[in-house]
Image: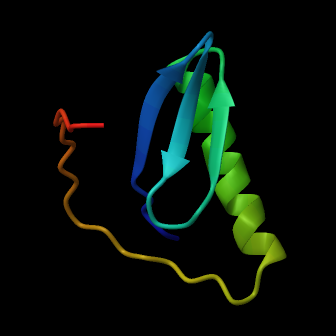
Amino acid sequence: MKNIKYTIYKEGEHYVAQCMNVDVSSFGSTVEEAIDNLTEAVELYFEDNENVVFFPIDNVILGDKTINA
């Protein structure tokens, strides 16, 4: 068993869930659906790939900064 960390953001009408431990994301119409879909996608990712590089993450800090662009 692995504990994954993820971020969720709204894009248009959908919520996007992005796993921070592996490069997998999914979406749903609700936050709960996005989390459920991400869980399934990450589990399938581990089933289909023998050489998965899993990045353990203990703490998450979400930032917001304005840049000159």
> Vertically, is 14 above or below 57?
above
What sort of colour scheme is used for the picture? rainbow
| Residue at the top extreme of this rendering | 13
Please state the horizontal and vertical placement of residue 60, each as a whole percent of the image. Answer: 22, 53
The residue lying at 43 percent from left, 48 percent from top is: 6
State the image coordinates of residue 8 (x, y, percent, origin top left): 44, 33
Q: Is residue 67 left or right of residue 33?
A: left
Looking at the image, the residue that sits furthest to the front is 69
| Left or right relative to 48: residue 2 | left
Residue in the image at 42% along x and 76% along y = 55
Furthest toward the right, the residue is 48
Say above or below: 37 vs 33. below
Q: Where is residue 44 drawn, in percent x and y? A: 77, 61
The quarter of the picture where the C terminus appears is top left
- Numbered circles on residues, count: 0
Q: Quadrant of residue 49?
A: bottom right
On screen, residue 64 above or below 48? above
Residue at image point 56% right, 32% down: 16
Residue nearest the observer in this picture, 57 or 11: 11
Q: Is 68 in front, or is 17?
A: 68
Residue at far bottom of view = 51
* Vertical order, 6 against 68 (above or below): below
Dividing the picture into quadrants, the one containing residue 13 is: top right
Residue 14 on image: x %, y %: 62, 18
